[in-house]
Image (tube, grey):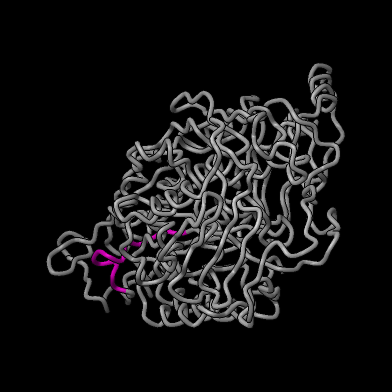
Amino acid sequence: MRFLAAVPFFFFLGGLVHAQQFPEAGWEAAPSPLASDFAEPGGKFTTFGSQYPKSFNYQIDNNVFSREIFRLMFETLLDTDPITLEDRPGLAHRWEISEDKKSFTFHLDPKAKWSDGKPITSEDVVWSFEAVKNPNHLTGAIQSVLKRLVKIEAPDASTVVIHAEEVHWKNLQACTAFRILPKHWWKDQDFNKVNYEFPVVSGPYQLGVVVEPHYARLERREDYWRTDAPEMTGLLNFDTIEYRFYPQMDVAFESFKKGEFDSFAVYTSSQWIKETSGDRFDRHWIAKQSIHNYNAIGFQGFAMNMRREPYNDKRVRKALAHLLDRKRMNRTIMFDQYILTSSYWPDIWDEEHPNPNVETTFDVEKARALLHEAGWSVNPATGKLEKDGKAFVIHFLTRDPSTTKFLLIYEEALKDVGIELKIDQKDWAAWARDMDEYNYDITWAAWGASPIKDPEGMWESASADLKAGNNITGFANAEVDALIERTREMFDVADRHEVIREIDQIIFEETPYVLLWHIDYVRLLYWNRYGMPDHVLGKYSDEWSTVDYWWNDAFQADDLKAAMSSGSAMPPPPRDVYFDKVFAPAVAVGPVRVEALR
C-alpha cells in the first residue's frame, strides 16, 4: 500500500473528554529523520520552476510552483512531521484543543520574528486569518478549507484562539492551512495585487532577484529565527535556490541537458525513454532515477465545465470520454509507460479494496448512441453534430503546446461523430485568469494529492461557484454532499477512506473529467554533482523536496567536472530507489494529519 489507509488519527480523537495540550509531555525538538548527517550548508541549486506564473502569492494563485516558493518565505502555526505526518511546533510552540473540540488555542514562539526584526504577534495571525477569509480576496481554495472556522481572538500578543462552528476532523488542519503574513506590511497593500514583492518574511528564504519571465532566486536568511533549531539541522542547505521558467516543457528539457539548471522531473514518456541516451546519460554525468516512495497519486484529465451546456449533460460527458483513445495514446506516444486512470483517488484502491470502477474504453459507437440520446444529431448537409440548430463546437483551453499531439488524436474521433474541436492556446497566466472565472469549455488539468484524502474542496456542491477554487468543473451532487457530511466526525483515517471509496464511485459515474493516466513513481534527472540522502526525496514528496534534503557536495562536483573533462564515466547511482528499502524508521508510524494548502 502506498498510503496510510489504516493509520488512526490518534491525536484528535472523537472520544477526547478533556482539553488536551500539545506537544505532549516529553516531546523534544530533534533533527529530521530524513536529513543527512553529511549535509553541509552553502552553494547554489538551480531547478525548473514552471511556466512563469501569474503570481508568486500562493494565497491567490493555487499552483504548485507558487506553493513551493511561498512555503519557503512564510510559515504556518504548526509544522508536519515528515514521517508520521503528526503536528509539531511551527510558529506556535504550544497549542490546546478544547474539551468540545471546537476551540483551538495557539501560543506563539517568543523567538519568532519577521525578517525586519519585528516580533511575530497574535495581530499578524488575526490579520492573516481575516485576509484569507475576506470574500473580496481571490483566496477561494483556502476559504473552502477555512469555512467552518468562524472566529479568531487574540487574548494577548502571543496567543490566538480560533473557534469552529461545529466539530469536524479537519478543523485543526484548517487552523494551520493558511500562512501567517506580516500585518504591518500587508495592511497597506491591495491583497489581490501582491504578486512578486515580499519584502518582509518569516521563513528560511527571502525573494531575491526576479527576472520576468526567466528566473527567480530565493536567498537563504542567516537571521532566520530558527536557523540554529535542532529541527533545521541538515535541511534547506542551499544559500541560493534559483527557479528557471520556460514556456514549454520541451524547451525546459533541452535547457536542462545543456546544463542550464540542475534537476528535472520528467512528465513526458518520450523524453524518459528516447531522449536520455548519449555520453551525458551513459556516463552518468546526468543521473536517471525512478523514485518509489509514498508520494500520493493525484489525477489528471480533461475537465468539463458543467456550468455550461452541453457539459451539464452526463450523457454528453460520457460520450466525450468514450471518444478518447487512451490506449492508442499510451502505446504510440507514451511507450506504454502509464496506467490508465479509473479513479479520482487511484491509490485508495488496493488488493484489499479492488477498484470497482469499470475502465472507460474507446468506443465511438457507444459515444454516438449517448449523443443521440442527449438530442444531438448529424446535419446531413454539413456533417456537423447539431442540437436545436446549434453545432457542437468544443473550445479547448490549454497552456502547453505539448498537449497538441494528444488533442490531434482526440480531434480525429470528435470529427468522426461531427464535433468540431478548437484549441485555445494561452500562457500560464492567461490560462489561470480564465480558470479563476471558469471561462472555459474543456481544459487539461492535473491535480496532486495527499496521503489523507479529502473530497470537500473539490467535490462539494458549496464550492461549485467559489471563484479561484478547486471545483473547476462546477460539480454538484447531493449524494456526494451527504457522504462528505458523514465524514464530519470520523477521526479515523480508515473509516473516512471507506466513505471516500463510495464517493469515488459516484464521481466516476458522473464523469466530470475525461480521465487520462498516471504513474506511481517520480522520474527524476539531475546533474550528478550534489549530495543527497539515500532516499533522494522525502517519504511523501515529489521532486520539489530536492531543495529540502540535498546539499552542495564539493567533492562530487569535482568528480563530475573531472569526468566530463576526461570523458570518463562516473559510478552509476541506483536506477530505482525504494523508500522502504533505504530508510528504516526509528519509530512506528503513529498520529496522522495532512495539511492541504501548506
The quadrant of the rendering that contains the N terminus is bottom right
Is 277 or 202 nearer to us in this picture?
202
Q: Is residue 40 left or right of residue 296?
A: right
Can you give x and y, in whole percent of width and height, for residue 94 in the image? 65, 57
- Residue 115 forms part of the magenta stretch: no
Can you give x and y, in whole percent of width and height, for residue 214 in the image? 48, 26
Is 515 or 554 nearer to us in this picture?
554
Q: Residue at x 52, y 77 (%)?
A: 358
Question: Is residue 306 placed above or below 541 in the rendered structure?
Answer: below
Report whether residue 146 is seen.
Answer: yes
Q: How many marks?
A: 0
Can you give x and y, in whole percent of width and height, for residue 562 in the image? 83, 19
Can you give x and y, in whole percent of width and height, for residue 192 in the image? 34, 43
Question: Is residue 212 placed above or below 158 in the rendered structure?
Answer: above
Q: Residue at x 37, y 40 (%)?
A: 187
Q: Residue at x 30, y 63 (%)?
A: 465
Chief secondary structure of the magenta span?
loop
Q: Is residue 324 left or right of residue 32?
A: left
Q: Residue at x 31, y 56 (%)?
A: 135
- Residue 430: image quadrant is top left
Q: Which residues are magenta?
A: 301-313
Report whether residue 492 is seen.
Answer: no
Question: Is residue 457 placed above or below 89 in the rendered structure?
Answer: below
Can you name the residue that lies furthest to the left here?
A: 389
Is 575 or 137 nearer to us in this picture?
137
Q: Is residue 322 left or right of residue 326?
A: left
